[in-house]
Image: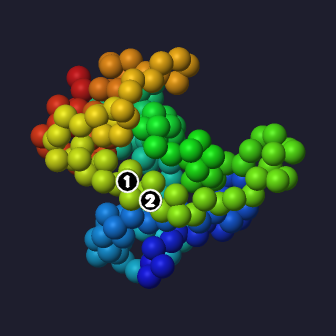
Amino acid sequence: MKRAVWTIPAAKAKMRRPHKVPLSRQVRALIRQLNDLSGEGRYLFPCIRTTERPMSESTINAALRRLGYDKTEMTGHGFRAMASTLLNEMDKWHPDVIERQLGHVDQNEVRRAYARGEYWADRVAMMQDWSDYLDTLRSGSKATVSGLRRTAPRTGKNSRTTATRARDDDALRAVAGSRKSPGLRPRS
């Protein structure tokens, strides 16, 4: 934690290679708070039955259902897809930086053999920017991705409708814990 890095061992990583995740100021503060709740054990989110295993994705999905989101609206893994989409729409971060942050490797074998950069400095800045964006949503602000970073509207296959942006902003506000957001009320 002193180095503000979370290292996922190869055995636990999706691509079966070690993956390092930079931790923003906000995430480090949340980890300190979590330690008060879950103790100094191996996992920040331990399984309710044993501290030898982490909480499952099913537990996260069940919490989302209790918030009123059905499985067609949001899943635990869906936050990765949402973050990827929004970070790409910011037009601030190179797609390779975003993909590396998600632990993905290039599918093109030739490019993968030559493009080995980890983009660490950009990933650190991007994760801090992402946490700052979530803080803006938590404050109840009407901020959207386009309002924060983009200078011109994007068109084409990566563009999203206003309704989709609003839904994603509501889901992020719910996770951020804002009581000021209409997206926090359980849906009926």
Q: Which residue is mark 1?
A: 129
From the viewer's side, name the closer residue of 146 and 103.
Answer: 146
As drawn, is 19 to the left or to the right of 38? right
Image quadrant where one finds the N terminus: bottom left
Q: Looking at this view, is 74 or 188 the one in front?
A: 74
- Tell me where residue 51 appears, x and y as whole percent: 48, 71
Amino acid at circle 2: Ala
On the image, the x and y values in percent for residue 22 come to 49, 65
User: Where is residue 86, by image quadrant?
Assistant: top left
* Quadrant in which the C terminus appears: top left
Q: How was this image coloured?
A: rainbow
Circle 1: element type:
helix
Q: Which residue is outermost to the left?
A: 180
Which numbered tag is attached to residue 162? none
Q: Give the residue at x 52% y 58%.
A: 122
**What amino acid does circle 1 point to?**
Asp
| Residue picked out by circle 2 | 125
Q: Tell me if mark 2 has few (under 14), some (14-19) or many (20+) residues whose alpha carbon lies within 10 angstroms of its own.
A: some
Tell me residue 127's x, y (percent): 44, 56
Residue at image location 42% in from the left, 47% down from the top:
60
* Vertical side of 89 occupied by 131: above or below: below
Q: Residue at x 76, y 53 (%)?
A: 115
**Label 2: element kind:** helix
Discs 2, 1 touching: Cβ within 8 Å: yes
